[in-house]
Image: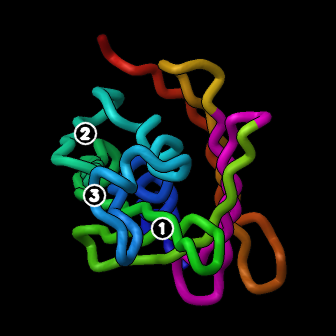
Amino acid sequence: MSKRLIVAAALVMVAACAALPARGQAAEEFANSAEGKVLGRYVGKWASEVEVTGADLQYKVKSTMDDSESLHLFTYDAEQKVYRSWWFNSTGLNSSASGTWDEATKKFSWTGTPTSGTTATWVERFTDDDTRVGELSIKDGDGKVVFGIKWKAVRKK
């Protein structure tokens, strides 16, 4: 597996997202729900721009490492009571993940599949309203870590 492929997958998984209203819920109702407020923590200007229309949150990222662009979608699955994530990259890569939110620690915990034969686990914690820190680990089919990254993002005011 190429290092470029792993780096592209890792960078986008942690950086881009969009919150979509849960099935059957009006956008305003979702935005005011506990789950909508959790995803609303991403609203604002961070390392990349975030655009908001109603309850929809769109998060796009352009990587300076490989000149790729990515989009990450987040939503809450009310039936399964988990957060869902889908990631799409301009190089043709994509992945999906499931996550949980811990209100006490203000932390997301995710597991996903960035590329065939690999698994990813990452956590992202809001240390305050304007700062989030995270860590991602990608392992191959044998459980060997093939890529890891840590980050800190501060909201621009």
Pick out the residue farthest to the top.
Answer: 157
Residue 4 rendering spot, x and y as whole percentages: 43, 64
Residue 79, position as x, y percentages in the image: 59, 80
Disc 1 to disc 3, how far (Cα)? 18 Å
- Callout 1: SS: strand
Q: Is residue 99 magenta?
A: no
Please state which of residues 56 and 127 is positioned toward the viewer in this rendering: 56
**Above or below 46: residue 110:** below
Quick check: 46 left or right of 3? left
The residue positioned 32% from the left and 71% from the top of the image is: 88
Q: What's under tag 3, amino acid-wise?
A: Ala
Residue at 63 percent across and 68 percent down: it is: 82
Residue that carries the numbered disc 2 in the rendered image: 50
Residue 102 x, y percent position in the rendering = 74, 46
- Give the residue pinned by disc 3: 27
Residue holding disc 1 = 85
Q: Earlier in the sequence, mark 2 or mark 1?
A: 2
Tell me if I can see residue 4 in this picture. yes
Q: Position of residue 21 (x, y in %)?
A: 34, 63
Mark toward the start of the polypeptide (1 vs 3)? 3
The amino acid beneath tag 1 is: Ser
Specify whether residue 107 is painted magenta. yes
Cα distance in 3D space between marks 2 and 1: 16 Å
Q: Residues within 10 Å of mark 2 (few under 14, many from 20)?
A: some
Which label was assigned to residue 5?
none
Amino acid type indicated by mark 2: Val
Is residue 101 found left or right of 4 in the rendered image? right
- The residues colored magenta run 104-125
